[in-house]
Image (cartoon, grey):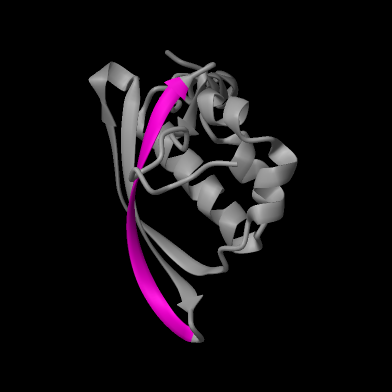
């Protein structure tokens, strides 16, 4: 027969061991990408362009100096909503769909943007390295 004095220690041990087996978000996972997207957009709302630059892909960082990027950060995001986050190509690429509000010509407008993310150096990075159109310029 099981003694009552062992009941609390055994139950405590079971609870602790089950907590250790809870699933954690793997770096390549959709949850990890979603967290990264949220952090990036929170930085944009705060107009804190340093973290946004830090989340850019390495090719972009080679093309654009950090100081220049921070200096040119003018987007005034009022609020955002992450609509969709997906991981593709076995965790090597991802995408996010975000709707945000900003002012254009003194009018509050909603804009929808699809972002491409790549997994490099052990974390998700926003792909900013390639211009979206032939008319976009860097630097």
Q: Say which residue appears at 45% left-offset and 82% top-offset.
A: 108
Viewer can see residue 6: yes
Please give left or right for residue 131 compared with residue 6 in the image: left
Extreme residue toward the bottom, this view: 106
Does 82 appear above or below 92?
below
Viewer can see residue 22: no
- Quarter of the rendering occupied by the N terminus: top left
- Quarter of the rendering occupied by the C terminus: top right
Please give left or right for residue 3 compared with residue 64 in the image: left
User: Relative to the observer, which residue lies in front, 98 or 17?
Assistant: 98
Q: Say which residue appears at 40% left-offset and 40% top-offset.
A: 131
Does 12 appear above or below 78?
above
Q: Is residue 120 magenta?
A: no
Q: Say which residue appears at 45% left-offset and 26% top-offset.
A: 24
Magenta-colored span: 107-119
Q: What percent of the width, then of the height, locates residue 65? A: 69, 35
Does 20 appear above or below 72?
above
Q: What percent of the width, then of the height, locates residue 104? A: 47, 77
């Amino acid at each position: 027969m099981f003694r009552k004095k062992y009941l609390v220690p055994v139950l405590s041990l079971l609870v602790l061991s089950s907590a250790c087996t809870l699933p954690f978000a793997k770096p390549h996972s959709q949850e990890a990408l979603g967290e990264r997207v949220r952090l990036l957009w929170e930085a944009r709302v705060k107009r804190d362009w340093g973290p946004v630059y830090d989340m850019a892909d390495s090719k972009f960082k080679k093309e654009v100096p950090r100081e220049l990027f921070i200096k040119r950060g003018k987007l005034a995001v009022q609020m955002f909503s992450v609509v969709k986050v997906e991981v593709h190509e076995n965790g090597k690429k991802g995408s996010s769909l975000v709707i945000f509000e900003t002012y254009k010509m003194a009018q509050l407008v909603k804009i929808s943007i699809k972002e491409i993310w790549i997994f490099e150096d052990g974390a998700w990075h926003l792909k900013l390295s390639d211009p979206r159109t032939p008319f976009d310029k860097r630097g």
